[in-house]
Image (spheres, rainbow, N blue to C red):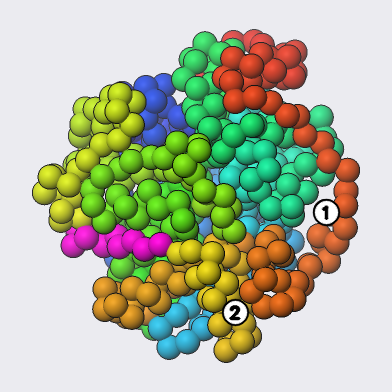
C-alpha cells in the first residue's frame, strides 16, 4: 500500500508517512486506495475476534495497509489485557433495542485515543530502531490526545514529546493526567489560546521544512495517517460484536470536533463494512454540522469558539475534513489544494453547496449531522443513568443525544453504535451536575489531581515555539536527517 497527499506529490511508503505526519505540501496523507473487505472476510474476522481477541483483528485489518513482518507482535503488545484492563479490549454493550455503546475508553488514560496511541507509540519505536534514528513528537490536544500520546510514548527509545494545550480549556482531570508527568522526554506547553491555535502552531512548525528535518519533528495528532488506520479497527470490532450477520447495516454515532474519529468509521465503510448512517455529533461548536447541512465550511475564530462541557470537541477548524473533501471531489488534488490551500487561507471559508457531489454525499457516503448543548448532555447522562444504570461522559452523551434526536425525526432508522469516547471520571463536574453525584474513580487514578504539575506557559507564536523547541530538544536532535 502506498499513501498519497491530499494536495498531490509522489506516493509514499507507510514507514515514511508514519514519521513525517503532515505532508511537505501541507496536505494530509491518505491510503492510495481502500482495500475491499467481503462478507466472507467479515465472517472469518468474527471468528478471529472471538479466538484471537482485538489484537488478532487489528492485525488482519492493518496488514491490508501496512506491510511489516513485525506487525502482529506490535498489535499483540499494544492491545494486551495489561494495557486495557480486560481481555475484551473494546467491548460493546446493548443499551436498548436500537442503541449500542462501543466502550473504547478502557486504556491507560481512559479515553478512546488510547486505542490508536498504544499502537502508534510502538510503531514509532519500531521504525526508529530500524533506521537507527530518533523522533521528536510535536502535538496539540483539546483534552485527550495529549495524555494518550504521552503515556504511549513515555519510556519509548528515541522519542521525546512536546504537547501543546489550550490554557484553562481542559477539565481538571485532563490537565492533571498530562501535567503530573515528570519526565525529561515529555514537555507540556500551555498556550494562551484555544485548541485551533495550538493546532495552527503545530502545522506552522511542520510547514517549516528545514526546521522539521533538522529537529526530526513528527506528529501524533490525527493528521498522522497511522492514527486514522488504527481507529478503523474498532469500527470493525464494534460492528462484529453488535451484528447478527455480515450484511445488515448498522449506523455509527460519533461525537467529533476534528473529524478524525468519524473519518475512520467512514474509511471502514469505504472498505465494505456494512455501516449505515454515519451520525456526526457536535457540541455548541457547530462548524461541522453546518457544513454537512449547507455545504459551507466556515471555521470560527478563537474568540468565537465556545468553551463547553464537552471540551475535547471545542474545535472550529477540523483538520481531518480535508481527507473527506479529497474523496468528495473524486481525489482531485488540485481542487483540494484550491479549497484548503487557497480559498480557506484567503477568505476563511469555502462553499460546496453548488457542487453536485456534495449534494449527493448523503446518498453516497451517508453522513448526517446534528448538534448537542450543555442541557442536552445533562439530560442524556441523567436519563441513561436513571433508566439503564449506564453512566457516560459528556462527549458520548453528545453522540447519543444526536442519534436519538435524528431517529425521533425520522432522519435515520435502524440500530446505532455510539462511540464511548472517555470514562466519566474525566469530567466529574458535569457528571455531578447531571446525576447529583461524582463518578467513580478507577483505582489507577487515585490522587492524580493532587499531584505536582509540570507545564510551561507560552504565547501563541510559532517563532517563540520553535525557539523553545530548539533549546529544549536533545543536542543530538540538531543533526539533519532526511526521512
In the displayed structure, does residue 363 sit left or right of residue 349?
left
**Can I make out residue 135 in this image?**
no
Instruction: Categorize mark 1 by other alpha carbons within 10 Å: few (<14), some (14-19), many (20+).
Output: some
Numbered tag placed on residue 21 in the rendering = none
* Mark with earlier residue (1, 2): 2
Q: Is residue 369 magenta?
A: yes
Can you tell which of label 1 and label 2 is closer to the viewer? 2
Tell me the SS state at disc 2: helix
Tell me the SS state at disc 1: helix
Q: Residue at x 64, y 16 (%)?
A: 464
Q: Position of residue 295 (x, y in %)?
A: 23, 48
Q: Residue furthest front?
A: 303
Q: Position of residue 162 (x, y in %)?
A: 68, 31
Q: Position of residue 481 (x, y in %)?
A: 57, 14
Q: Residue at x 33, y 78 (%)?
A: 407
**Which residue has dot 2 on it?**
382
- The number of numbered badges drawn on the structure is 2
In the displayed structure, does residue 325 sit left or right of residue 55?
left
The residues bearing labels 1 and 2 have C-alpha atoms spaced at a distance of: 25 Å
Label 2 near label 1: C-beta < 8 Å? no
Q: Residue at x 56, y 55 (%)?
A: 308
Give the quarter of the figure containing the N terminus. top left
**Which residue has dot 1 on it?**
449
Q: Where is residue 52, by image quadrant?
A: bottom right
Nearest the viewer among 43 and 416 is 416
Q: Residue at x 20, y 55 (%)?
A: 361
- Residue numbers of the magenta segment: 362-371
Q: Position of residue 7 (x, y in %)?
A: 30, 28
Above or below, 269 against 9 in this view is below
Q: Is residue 189 magenta?
A: no
Above or below, 74 against 107 in this view is above
Nearest the viewer among 441 and 458 is 458
Amino acid at each position: 500500500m502506498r499513501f498519497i497527499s491530499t494536495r498531490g506529490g509522489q506516493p509514499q511508503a507507510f514507514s515514511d508517512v508514519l514519521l513525517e505526519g503532515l505532508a511537505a505540501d501541507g496536505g494530509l496523507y491518505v491510503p492510495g486506495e481502500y482495500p475491499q473487505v467481503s462478507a466472507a472476510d467479515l465472517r472469518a474476522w468474527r471468528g478471529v475476534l472471538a479466538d484471537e481477541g482485538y489484537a488478532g483483528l487489528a492485525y488482519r485489518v492493518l496488514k491490508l495497509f501496512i506491510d511489516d513482518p513485525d506487525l502482529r507482535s506490535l498489535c499483540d503488545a499494544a492491545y494486551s489485557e495489561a494495557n486495557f484492563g480486560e481481555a475484551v479490549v473494546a467491548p460493546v454493550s446493548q443499551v436498548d433495542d436500537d442503541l449500542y455503546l462501543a466502550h473504547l475508553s478502557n486504556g491507560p488514560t481512559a479515553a478512546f485515543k488510547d486505542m490508536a496511541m498504544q499502537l502508534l507509540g510502538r510503531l514509532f519505536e519500531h521504525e526508529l530502531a530500524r533506521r537507527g534514528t530518533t523522533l521528536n513528537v510535536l502535538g496539540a490536544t483539546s483534552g485527550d490526545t495529549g495524555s494518550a500520546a504521552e503515556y504511549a510514548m513515555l519510556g519509548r527509545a528515541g522519542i521525546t514529546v512536546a504537547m501543546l494545550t489550550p490554557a484553562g480549556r481542559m477539565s481538571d482531570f485532563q490537565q492533571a493526567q498530562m501535567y503530573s508527568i515528570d519526565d525529561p522526554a515529555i514537555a507540556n506547553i500551555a498556550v494562551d489560546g484555544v485548541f485551533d491555535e495550538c493546532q495552527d502552531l503545530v502545522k506552522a512548525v511542520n510547514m517549516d521544512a528545514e526546521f522539521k528535518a533538522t529537529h526530526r519533528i513528527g506528529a501524533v495528532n490525527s493528521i498522522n495517517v497511522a492514527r486514522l488506520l488504527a481507529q478503523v479497527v474498532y469500527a470493525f470490532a464494534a460492528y462484529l460484536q453488535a451484528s447478527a450477520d455480515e450484511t445488515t447495516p448498522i449506523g455509527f454515532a460519533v461525537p467529533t470536533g476534528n473529524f478524525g474519529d468519524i473519518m475512520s468509521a467512514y474509511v471502514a465503510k469505504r472498505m465494505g463494512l456494512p455501516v449505515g448512517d454515519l451520525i456526526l455529533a457536535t457540541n455548541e461548536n457547530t462548524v461541522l454540522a453546518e457544513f454537512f447541512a449547507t455545504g459551507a465550511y466556515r471555521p470560527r475564530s478563537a474568540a468565537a469558539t465556545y468553551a463547553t462541557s464537552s471540551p475535547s470537541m471545542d474545535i472550529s477548524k477540523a483538520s481531518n475534513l480535508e481527507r473527506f473533501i479529497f474523496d468528495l471531489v473524486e481525489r482531485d488534488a488540485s481542487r483540494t489544494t484550491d479549497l484548503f490551500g487557497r480559498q480557506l487561507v484567503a477568505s476563511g471559508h469555502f462553499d460546496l453547496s453548488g457542487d453536485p457531489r456534495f449534494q449527493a454525499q448523503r446518498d453516497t457516503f451517508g453522513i448526517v449531522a446534528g448538534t448537542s448543548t450543555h442541557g442536552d448532555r445533562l439530560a442524556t447522562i441523567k436519563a441513561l443513568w436513571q433508566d439503564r444504570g449506564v453512566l457516560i461522559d459528556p462527549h458520548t452523551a453528545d453522540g447519543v443525544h444526536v442519534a436519538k434526536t435524528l431517529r425521533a425525526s425520522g432522519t435515520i432508522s435502524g440500530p446505532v453504535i455510539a462511540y464511548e469516547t472517555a470514562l466519566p471520571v474525566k469530567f466529574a463536574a458535569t457528571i455531578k451536575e447531571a446525576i447529583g453525584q461524582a463518578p467513580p474513580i478507577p483505582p489507577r487514578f487515585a490522587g492524580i489531581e493532587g499531584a505536582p504539575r509540570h507545564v510551561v506557559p507560552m504565547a501563541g507564536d510559532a517563532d517563540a515555539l520553535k525557539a523553545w523547541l530548539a533549546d529544549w530538544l536533545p543536542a543530538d536532535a540538531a543533526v539533519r536527517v532526511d526521512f
